[in-house]
Image (cartoon, rainbow, N blue to C red):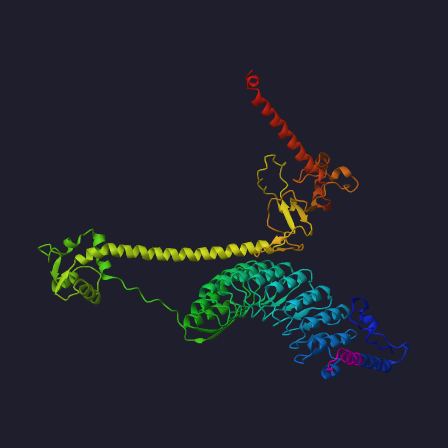
């Protein structure tokens, strides 16, 4: 049996061995089954020996647990104090291993140098599929190496990077790496320091990635603008099924953006928004998206500032949405009331799989106490409705017209009238009009307070209008930011234009013609690095082509248009060079028009056509310039010789 030496297993790029070399066996391959078992044991021993020699080489103590469990598909080395050197020795040994599928290296302080060795390991080892690097102090330098690992590895399916101190700038590395890697299915980035710009980068990650199914971003700082930008990327994602956003402080702003995203996302099954400072208002915003979503099954909203009102809103959404898929709602810290229990029982009759977890029965809906009405205002309103004056009302008891009457007469007059005042309001009114306790009511105070009451009423209305206006402006601003983020992360992979008439020479925008989608021309944009999308932070992020179709807009004369797809008008178009002439607006040549009239059934077939020559638009521009120059010369001549123009 051939035993691999340390020199042969050095982690240089040009010397990395493939698993085929590590599987070398004895020359006598025609032995019985017992000899094959001995060969397997010998191979395992060879990995152990290589590990022992590597530990001597780098100067670390070997981990006995690793040697004892070499044949296991899961290698758990959590809290073993490997460090960067121990990780290097481990990587040297695992180059020739073909058994380990899951490698757990959490809490080993391997730092960026250790990750660098793992990058070289995964270039040679194609059996490791699950890797745990949580809490290893990787920081920004380690994030770059991890991104390189994600780009190079072809076997890795899940990776845990929790608690490594990654910041906003580090999120950019993961976005760039996972934009082209669709093999990673499970990504854990919890307990890091992603904030506003990190949310933008992670939103772009979701928009560009086509393979990620599980994403854990709990215990980060995605709030405000970062939460809105992340939700925008989630809106256009079509693969994610499990999303954990607990402990992020999303707030009502993030709930509004997430609700908008849930209207369009139809792949997510599990959403965790626990500990995110949501209120009843935020829950109502989230419910707007749940009304349109048909795939979400589990919604966790535990330990938010939700009361019975929010709980009722959630159950009402399930009750009023026949196509909803919600099966589990967790609001385990909310005390509900009997109305909620009755509504839940009624809803479960239509949705028997629904399970709502709440704390218990004993909650209540907080009603605001009724606003105390000013008795002076009641009297003024009474007089205004009947178009009476104060003196007209009290003239029976105020014969002199001094507007001063005894308290007993004033009380009797008010009680005998139809003014809607109770006994307590009458006593309050007397107390205010007779502050000195003289026994005489000066009801001129009613007239003096009328203007003040009107001013107070207008001021109160203005406050309510101002508060409503601010709330609406805030919601509009969040939605505008959300839409801007959606435009930033949505790939412009294709444009759709209408095959209208000839191009207008005036340059004015042309209206779209209402033609069916099957007759439209699809213009595929290139993957050139010159074309990028600006995100919310002002950085240019290059986006790959996706299969989605961007919103319709009028294309410009950009060199990004490379190929055209249109109906196959001629059966022998591949042999006829004249049939390939077509304008940017969809005008076909005369031969094509004539042939399309003869064979209309062939218009259903499509084929790919090469890009148009750039000489055609240039010639048009030149002719326009010549015409303008001639017209300008003619005007100049006429202005210089006015007499000739008159003759």
Which quarter of the rendering shows the N terminus? bottom right
Among all residues in the image, which is located at the extreme top? 647
Expressed as whole percent of the image width and height from the top left, the position of residue 393 reads: 15, 55
The residue closer to the viewer here, 513 or 544, is 544
**Range of residues picked out in magenta:** 48-62
Magenta stretch, main secondary structure, is helix
Q: Position of residue 170 (x, y in %)?
A: 62, 64
102 left or right of 441 in image: right
Q: Quadrant of the C terminus?
A: top right
In the rendered structure, the answer to whether residue 498 lies left or right of residue 258 reads right
**Res. 320 in view:** no
Q: Is residue 110 left or right of residue 283?
A: right
Closest to the observer, 520 or 93: 93
> Is residue 245 placed above or below 58 in the rendered structure?
above
Is 384 left, or right, of 26 in this rendering?
A: left
Q: Indicate the quadrant where residue 642 lies.
A: top right
Residue closest to the eye, 254 or 338: 254
Vertical position of residue 550 compared to residue 291: above or below: above
Q: Is residue 52 magenta?
A: yes
Provide residue 422's location: percent of width, then percent of height: 21, 65
Q: Residue at x 29, y 57 (%)?
A: 456
Residue 88 at what x, y percent from top left?
A: 73, 75
**Figure check: 572 above or below 38:** above
- Furthest toward the left, the residue is 400
Tell me if residue 366 is in the magenta stretch: no
Q: Quadrant of residue 513?
A: top right
Q: Is residue 358 visible?
A: yes
Taking depth in this image into account, of 542 and 507 the one nearest to the observer is 542
The quarter of the picture where residue 184 lies is bottom right
């Amino acid at each position: 049996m051939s035993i691999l030496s340390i020199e042969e297993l050095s982690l240089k790029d040009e010397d990395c061995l493939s698993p085929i070399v590590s599987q070398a066996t004895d020359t006598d391959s025609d032995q019985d089954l017992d000899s094959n078992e001995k060969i397997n044991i010998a191979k395992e021993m060879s990995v152990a020996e290589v590990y022992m020699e590597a530990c001597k080489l780098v100067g670390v103590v070997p981990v006995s647990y690793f040697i004892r469990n070499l044949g296991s598909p899961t290698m758990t080395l959590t809290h073993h104090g490997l460090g960067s050197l121990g990780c290097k020795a481990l990587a040297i040994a695992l180059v020739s291993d073909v058994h380990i599928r899951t490698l757990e290296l959490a809490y080993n302080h391997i730092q960026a140098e250790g990750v660098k060795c793992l990058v070289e390991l995964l270039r040679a080892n194609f059996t490791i599929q699950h890797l745990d690097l949580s809490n290893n102090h990787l920081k920004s330098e380690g994030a770059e190496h991890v991104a390189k690992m994600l780009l190079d590895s072809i076997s890795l399916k899940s990776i845990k990077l929790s608690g490594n101190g990654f910041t906003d700038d580090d999120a950019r590395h993961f976005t760039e790496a996972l934009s082209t890697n669709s093999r990673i299915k499970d990504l854990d980035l919890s307990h890091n320091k992603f904030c506003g710009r990190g949310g933008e980068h992670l939103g772009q990650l979701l928009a560009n990635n086509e393979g990620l199914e599980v994403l854990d971003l709990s215990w980060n700082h995605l709030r405000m603008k970062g939460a809105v930008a992340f939700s925008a990327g989630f809106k256009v994602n079509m693969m994610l099924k499990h999303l954990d956003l607990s402990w992020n402080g999303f707030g009502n702003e993030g709930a509004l953006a997430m609700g908008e995203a849930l209207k369009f996302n139809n792949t997510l099954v599990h959403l965790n928004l626990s500990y995110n400072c949501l209120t009843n208002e935020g829950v109502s915003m989230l419910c707007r998206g749940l009304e349109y979503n048909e795939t979400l099954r589990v919604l966790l909203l535990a330990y938010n500032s939700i009361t019975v009102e929010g709980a009722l809103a959630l159950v009402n959404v399930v009750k009023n949405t026949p196509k909803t898929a919600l099966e589990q709602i967790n609001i385990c810290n909310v005390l509900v009331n009997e109305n909620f229990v009755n509504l839940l029982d009624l809803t479960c009759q239509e949705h028997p799989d629904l399970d709502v977890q709440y704390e218990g029965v004993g909650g209540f809906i907080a009603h605001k106490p009724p606003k105390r009405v000013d008795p002076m205002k009641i009297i003024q309103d009474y007089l205004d409705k009947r178009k009476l004056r104060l003196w007209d009302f009290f003239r029976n008891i105020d014969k002199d017209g001094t507007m001063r009457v005894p308290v007993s007469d004033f009380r009797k007059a008010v009680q005998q009238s139809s003014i809607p005042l109770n006994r307590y309001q009458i006593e309050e009114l007397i107390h205010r009009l007779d502050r000195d306790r003289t026994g005489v009511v000066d009801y001129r105070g009613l007239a003096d307070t009328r203007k003040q009451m009107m001013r107070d009423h207008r001021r109160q209305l203005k406050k309510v209008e101002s508060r409503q206006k601010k709330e609406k402006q805030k919601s509009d601003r969040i939605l505008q930011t959300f839409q801007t983020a959606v435009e930033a992360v949505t790939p412009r992979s294709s444009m759709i234009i209408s095959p209208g008439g000839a191009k207008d020479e005036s340059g004015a925008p042309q209206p779209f013609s209402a033609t069916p989608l099957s007759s439209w021309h699809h213009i595929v944009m290139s993957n050139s690095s010159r074309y990028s999308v600006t995100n919310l932070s002002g950085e240019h992020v290059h986006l790959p082509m996706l299969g989605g179709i961007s919103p319709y807009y009028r294309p410009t004369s950009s060199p990004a248009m490379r190929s055209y797809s249109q109906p196959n008008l001629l059966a022998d178009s591949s042999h006829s060079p004249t049939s390939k002439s077509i304008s940017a607006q969809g005008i076909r040549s005369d031969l094509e028009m004539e042939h399309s009239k003869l064979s209309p059934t062939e218009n259903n077939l499509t084929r790919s056509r090469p890009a148009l020559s750039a000489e055609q638009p240039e010639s048009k521009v030149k002719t326009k310039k010549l015409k303008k120059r001639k017209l300008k010369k003619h005007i100049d001549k006429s202005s210089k010789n006015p007499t000739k123009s008159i003759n």
